[in-house]
Image: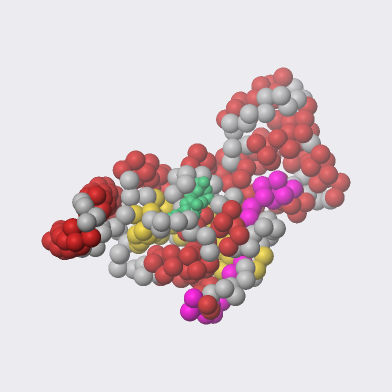
Amino acid sequence: MSARSIGAMVDGHRLVVVVGTGGVGKTTMAAALALGAALRGRRAMVLTIDPARALARALGLAALAPGGEPVSLAALPAVGLRPAGSLAAGMLDQKHAWDAFVNRHAPSAAAARTILDNRFYQELSTSFAGATEYMAIEETCRLAESGRYDLVVLDTPPAAHALDFLRAPERLDPLLDHRVTALLARPTALAGAFAKVVLRWLEQAAGHVAMADVSAFLLALDTLLDDAVARTRKARELLRGGNAGFVLVTGPRQLVLDETGAFVERMRAVDAELTGVVLNRAHPAPGCTAAEAAAVLAELAATAAADGAGDPAVAWADAAWRDAEAEAAAEVAPVETFLAALPPGVAHAVIPDATRDVHSLADLAAVAARLWA
Ligand SMILES: Nc1ncnc2c1ncn2[C@@H]1O[C@H](COP(=O)(O)OP(=O)(O)OP(=O)(O)O)[C@@H](O)[C@H]1O
Ligand SMILES: [Mg+2]
């Protein structure tokens, strides 16, 4: 464990973003960090993206409220915990968030309608590679600014788009420049060709959308630009230069750590402050020395012989112990190398692999205790 816990770092932030490659436990850690803060008296909110069903149930997320709903913590006193704060959870619905964004920033209901009905907008808001990330930033900033929460923890989507999250505002910038939209909106061949280049650059897969729709969309977009540009600048400020904490989740295996190393480099490049690293699903050593294990096995062998049970039970116990040792040993060197390469001052926590899914508030509280240890 590092000198300062991840939890202690989170205590000093109002906005925390949980990042990492696919399936490593980002959503679980985001929920555990928010719960840990709630246990310490803060009004915490976790904005998740597609949580595993069991976790969604634990958080009472069946209703998918995008703006966040209070999570009942009534189950915690039974496990000896009395939360001094509160927890809310929300699940990001990308389409809903984009439509709300348009409604907020359009100068009139009619202008909003024009955009919402436009086919290019409908494609952009659902299939553009950075669309979820962009809205996640927007929603998080809104929640953080709402004054309703002391801490907002944002979960991010899996691997492929994980870094788009950090780049999303820049990627949309060209679209948010009046000169570019004015040029694109002109129904000329040059504008059409330029628009195609921009669209390809945006990894826009909507080749079947007519250019007329694109032009109409961009003309309509122009009406809400000033507001939206100010918004995205603000969002970027909130995320950069130490304003937000970034907690990176990874695993103890070489392959995951390799992917994560590249991720850390890119985070540094975009000035996202790496606050802490969670090594999730680790396999700690069995916790006894070889001599102790040998003594237990000898005892087992003696009992087995007395019972006439023979050696299979002993052989099984022996193999299980050796497997656990080998698994733990294989994780030591990759983890040490990874931790040694982290920038100074980055906290880390090791969370053991639970034999079952993390699926209740009590499970999350147990994870949180480790994050604050
Ligand atoms: N320490 C742990 N021990 C056991 N199971 C865990 C642990 N951490 C997470 N899990 C389980 O692993 C699964 C994946 O976790 P989670 O959904 O948090 O990952 P994710 O990084 O958000 O995935 P995705 O990239 O798909 O969004 C879940 O079923 C969760 O309960
Ligand atoms: Mg997830």
Q: Which residue is painted at 31% across and 43% down in the image?
A: 254
Res 275 quadrant in image: bottom left
Res 143 quadrant in image: bottom right
Q: Quadrant of the C terminus?
A: bottom left
Q: Is residue 199 above or below residue 64?
A: above
* Horizontal side, residue 368 vs residue 306: left or right: right
Q: Position of residue 332 (x, y in %)?
A: 24, 52
**Residue reaching furthest to the right:** 110
Can residue 85 be found in the magenta stretch? yes
Res 45 quadrant in image: bottom right
Q: Position of residue 276 (x, y in %)?
A: 39, 59
Is residue 300 among what the camera can see? no
Q: Which residue is painted at 50% across and 69% down in the image?
A: 362
| Segment tinted magenta in the rendering | 79-99
Q: Which residue is painted at 73% across and 33% down in the image?
A: 120
**Residue reaching furthest to the front:** 308
Q: Is residue 300 above or below residue 173?
A: below
Is residue 252 among what the camera can see? yes
Q: Quadrant of the N terminus?
A: bottom left
**Residue reaching furthest to the left:** 291
Q: Nearer the viewer, residue 359 or 254?
A: 359
